[in-house]
Image: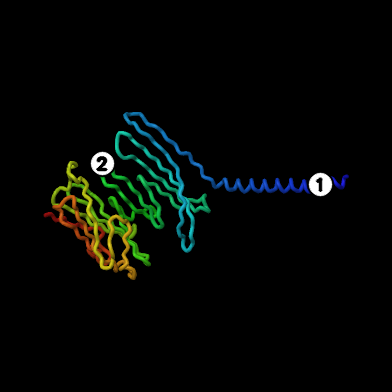
Amino acid sequence: MDTLKRLIYTPLRLLIFIFFTVLFCDTEMFSQTMKKILTEESCFQVIDQNGMKGYKSVEYTYKVYGNTFGDEWVDYLAKYKTTTLKNLSYEGQNRTIEVAICRLDRMDSIIYYIKRDCDQLDLSRDNYKTIKYGCCADLSKIALYDYSNRLIISGSEKIYEGFIPNNKIRFYFSYQSRPDTLTLGQINYSYNASDQYHVVLKSERSTIRNGVEDCPMLYPEIDLSLSGAGIFNKDEEVCTFWSLEKIRTINGINFILKLKFDCDSTIRPITIPIINGKPFGKDIETQIYNIEYD
């Protein structure tokens, strides 16, 4: 009988030991995983004081995206904190977006931190873009930054990227509204945060417009001329320059930017040549272009 009990109980004790060993190991592994779980609490507050009726909200969201680090492909985690203050009596809102970026396998170490007052913030491989939506008769404000938080280029409504296939050279151009008394706006042309050019469009008459006009916002039709460039689509933010594929320096970049203000037919078309990679071929950061009228 004792021998029979030993034959029965010994496997049973072994099974119990294995069960609790596995349970303990699984619990340990789960607790290690739990350490990597991020928890932030979003909140919403109704505001009705000092004549203001509106709300304040704080939201947390997460995005995982891949990027290269040297020759290595790395997955990154971007944690967004979006704080919005909205007055229901007015259009638009005040919004601040903060982004903390870390490697997905090293979540305890933040490698990039971004904080911008904007309505939208989009991450890409080499830079990030912010958008502040225009309201009433205002144009949307767009800006491109590198991950050191340095401004690469800003513009109204759109920033165009000049993409050259099989080439590391990139450049950007935009129109930026500057509606003061005698300045219509400016053309921005940039390679990076330290290599930028601006062409200020000066006027001999007031550029302040009456809001009751059919077109209170002056924004040009943008086109370009480049041999072999194909068709430029003003609705696409990336323009592919196949004819520049074999250039080795920015000195090989030559094309013509054309702007036409259909909203005001008295403004003559504006032509900005990019010669050897610079507006008008001049190594001057800011130049003046005098607008001509009919």
Label 1 sits on a secondary structure element that is: helix
Image: 245 above or below 135: below
Q: Pick the quarter of the image with the N terminus.
A: top right
| Of residues 14 and 286, the one drawn nearer to the viewer in this rendering | 14
User: Is 60 displayed left or right of 241 in the figure?
Assistant: right
Q: Specify few, some or many for label 1: CA neighbours under 10 Å numbering under 14, 14-19, or 20 or more.
A: few
Q: Name the residue under label 1.
A: 8
Please, which residue is most extreme toward the left here?
294
Front position in the image: 44 or 286: 44
Which label belongs to residue 140?
Answer: none
Amino acid on which disc 1 is placed: Ile
Quick one: quadrant of the C terminus?
A: bottom left
Measuring from the top left, give residue 158's x and y in whole percent: 30, 53
Rendered location of residue 128, percent (x, y): 38, 53
Where is residue 26 shown, x and y percent of the image? 64, 47
Is disc 2 placed on a helix, strand or loop?
loop
Residue 212: percent from the left, percent from the top?
Answer: 18, 41
- Discs 1/2, front: 1
Taking the spot 48% from the left edge, 60% from the top edge, the residue there is: 73
Amino acid beneath label 2: Cys
How many discs mark residues in the rendered view? 2
Dots 1, 2 in contact, CB < 8 A: no
- Numbered label attached to residue 136: 2
CA separation in Å, label 1 and label 2 = 84 Å
Q: Residue at x 45, y 58 (%)?
A: 67
Q: Residues within 10 Å of mark 2 (few under 14, many from 20)?
A: few
Q: Decide which of tag 1 and tag 2 comes sooner along the chain.
A: 1
Q: In this view, does 28 lie to the left or right of 7?
A: left
Image coloring type? rainbow
